[in-house]
């Protein structure tokens, strides 16, 4: 059995808490999913499929588009191979009644793999986070540790807003968006307090926040 690293555990911890906070109070009862290729054409019970989930291929394709990463058997092959190996553990179709906790975990794991690529080297990081304080080469523990880039409210907001804009689109003023943002801000702030003063820890917190935004963005439709 594969053991989760401490880095992945933090990303999963962030995601689970934000998920519960953002989704428990903000789902509109009148929400209707976009048209799909679901083959269930029978009459729906009142409320059935009022909310849907993306299937495994839609989740993967969405992550490719939103991250801007090229993924194939020759480019970022680790992502391609991870998806190919684990796609059976992702949601098979768009029926939310089949969206069990293990499916959410699998979606989170895939999002984490993408976010790890985005934050693990200077080339991908500077491209994805371009225009922010995080879209530069990290070279100084003294000026780019969590104490300098995550603890300050303005820097933390810059990171969270960038991720939400990339994964969820422009702020629509919804409670869902506001709740997600506040939860991410609070959790990042808590985790950054007392964090080791090095750029690796900053990347770790960036990765966790990225995983949160990506997981939420690719799950429901």
Image (cartoon, rainbow, N blue to C red):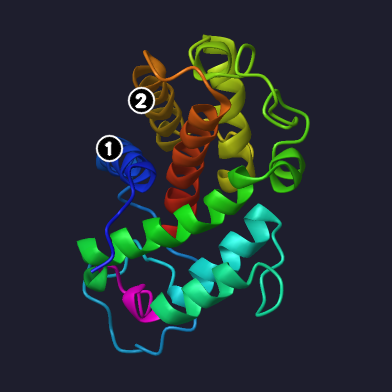
Where 36 falls versus 104 (above or below)?
below
User: Could you tell me if residue 221 is visible in this image?
Assistant: no
Please give left or right for residue 150 compared with residue 48 in the image: right
Mark yes or no: residue 190 visible.
yes
Residue 6 on image: x %, y %? 32, 42
Query: Position of 122 compared to 104: left or right?
Result: right
Q: Which mark is residue 59?
A: none
**Image-based side of 83 in relation to 72, left or right:** left
Q: Which residues are magenta?
A: 87-96
Q: How many marks?
A: 2
- Residue 55, compared with residue 24, is above or below; it is below
Whole-angstrom CA distance, mark 2 to mark 1, is 9 Å
Dot 2 and dot 1 residues touching (CB under 8 Å): yes
Q: Earlier in the sequence, mark 2 or mark 1?
A: 1
- Provide residue 23's location: percent of width, then percent of height: 31, 43
Q: Which residue is mark 2?
A: 187
Above or below — where is 193 with respect to 215? above
Residue 32 spot, x, y in % from top left: 41, 61
Magenta span: chief secondary structure: loop
Label 1, on which residue? 17
Q: Residue at x 37, y 14 (%)?
A: 193
Quadrant for the N terminus, please.
bottom left
Is residue 92 inside the magenta stretch? yes
SS for dot 2:
helix
Of residues 24 and 206, the one drawn nearer to the viewer in this rendering: 206
């Amino acid at each position: 059995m594969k053991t989760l690293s401490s880095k992945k555990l933090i990303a999963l911890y962030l995601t689970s808490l934000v998920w519960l906070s953002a989704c428990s109070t903000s789902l509109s009862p009148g929400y209707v999913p976009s048209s799909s290729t679901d083959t269930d054409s029978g009459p729906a019970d009142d409320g059935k499929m009022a909310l849907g989930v993306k299937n495994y291929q839609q989740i993967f394709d969405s992550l490719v588009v939103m991250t801007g990463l090229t993924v194939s058997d020759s480019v970022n092959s680790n992502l391609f191979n991870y998806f190919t190996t684990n796609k059976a553990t992702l949601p098979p179709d768009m029926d939310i009644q089949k969206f069990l906790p293990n499916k959410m975990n699998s979606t989170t794991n895939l999002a984490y793999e993408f976010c790890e690529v985005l934050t693990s080297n200077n080339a991908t990081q500077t491209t994805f986070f371009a225009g922010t304080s995080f879209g530069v080469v990290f070279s100084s523990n003294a000026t780019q540790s969590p104490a300098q880039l995550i603890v300050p409210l303005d820097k933390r907001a810059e990171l969270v807003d960038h991720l939400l804009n990339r994964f969820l689109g422009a702020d629509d003023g919804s409670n869902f968006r506001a709740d997600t943002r506040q939860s991410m801000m609070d959790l990042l702030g808590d985790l950054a307090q007392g964090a080791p003063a090095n750029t690796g820890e900053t990347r770790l917190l960036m990765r966790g926040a990225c995983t949160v935004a990506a997981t939420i963005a690719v799950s429901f439709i």
